[in-house]
Amino acid sequence: MANYTSAPEDDYDVLIEGDLRNNEIELCTPYDPKILSAQLVPYLYTTVFVAGLLDNILVVFILVKYKRSKQAENTCFFNLALSNLCFLLTLPFWAYAASRGEGFDDPLCKILLLLYSVGLYSEALFNVLLTVQRYPESVRGRRRFSDCRPMASRIFISALVWVTAILVSLPELVFYKPQMESQKYKCFFIGLHFLPADETSWKHFLTLKMNILGFLLPLFALIYCCMRMGRTCQFRQRNYDLCKLVSTITAVFLLMWGPYNIALFLSAFKEQLPLHGCGNSYNLNKTVQITRIIAATHCCINPLLYVFLDKAFRKHLGHLCHLCSDTAPQPTEDPAQGTSGEEYHLTTEMETSSCQRQDK
């Protein structure tokens, strides 16, 4: 009798355990990012690519035509446009891949990965350089330091930033592993820097690197320089517009890439945080994809900021529009005479005189 009564209890326990496992498997269905990518990425990235390509090329053209790169901050603006163009080149490929639901082969994957990473890290570093070099110049006695640097020095600093961005991107490029799908190795615009999900150690390393260089470093630079500017009583009203432009560029970069960095950190370290449940994993993976799609649209934002916040840029843009429509005569003023005092960062006379006094 004992054996007879115990058997049904054992069977009952086994059935309950099996049902629980089946339910758990159903609840832990992984998030499929290809669905949202197919619906949103092709149209959004195509639009961003066309708009970003036109307005960033326009920025480069204005900087070169009117020789605005002679000023230190304009050198950074020029390099920011190049960073955006570098990042923009990857968007048509991801739009095509999302529309077809397919990935790319290994050689093309590494090229796209390099362009994506170099464009992102170089923009973050140039934002730091732009912020750090502008705010201390608002303090009397250091106002024209960077403007007195020769062009060769600025080119060297810009090249150093680009080399740093390439070196920072090497871990993704060297240790990249494509994903297996349909018995072929492919890469997709999903996941963490195109690395498989089982690479836990590299996932942590790349996440921390992205958070530190792409988010925390520009954030700390902006906070430090704002505090420095706020503590000094010698901030000149003449520099207010330029500082507002610089701070807005960095702040918009942080606002658009910040949510992705936060979601990426929570997703990568969910096992160490109380976020390892099925529902949390699903929501985190979805949040990472959405924030990444939104952050990638940042590469067409900076030129819009120049239009709204830069008087000189608006003037030259309007001049180009008049030239294209043949509705305005050619300017009669001598370019060597510079521009009006209203256009703060195109004026060179005060910079030149300041450098001369320092040389004496």
Image (cartoon, rainbow, N blue to C red):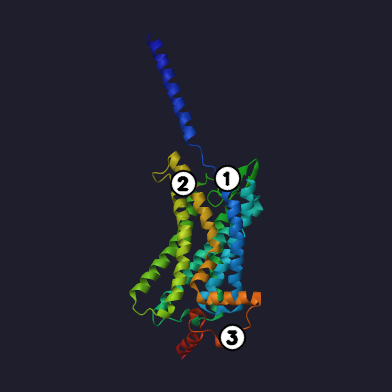
Nearer the observer, disc 2 or disc 3?
3
Q: What is the crowding at mark 2: few (fewer than 14 residues within 10 Å), some, or many (at least 20)?
A: many
Vertical order, 119 against 322 (above or below):
above
Amino acid residing under circle 1: Lys
Left or right? Give the position of 229 relative to 288. left
Q: How far is disc 2 from disc 3 in space, using C-alphas?
A: 55 Å
Q: What is the crowding at mark 1: few (fewer than 14 residues within 10 Å), some, or many (at least 20)?
A: many
Q: Quick check: can you spot residue 32?
A: yes
Q: Quick check: can you spot residue 202?
A: no
Give me the residue at 45% from left, 60% from top: 255
Sooner in the amino-acid sequence: mark 1 or mark 2: 1
Vertical order, 78 against 200 (above or below):
below
Q: What is the crowding at mark 3: few (fewer than 14 residues within 10 Å), some, or many (at least 20)?
A: few
Q: How far is disc 1 from disc 2 in space, using C-alphas?
A: 15 Å
Task: Provide the secondary structure element on which disc 1 rests.
Answer: helix
Residue indicated by mark 1 = 34
Q: Position of residue 310 (x, y in %)?
A: 50, 74
Amino acid residing under circle 2: Leu
Residue indicated by mark 2 = 284
- Nearer to me, 246 or 39: 39
Q: Do the residues labelled 3 and 1 touch (CB within 8 Å)?
A: no
Q: Position of residue 123 (x, y in %)?
A: 52, 65
- The dot on residue 186 is none
Q: How far is disc 3 from disc 1 in space, using C-alphas?
A: 54 Å
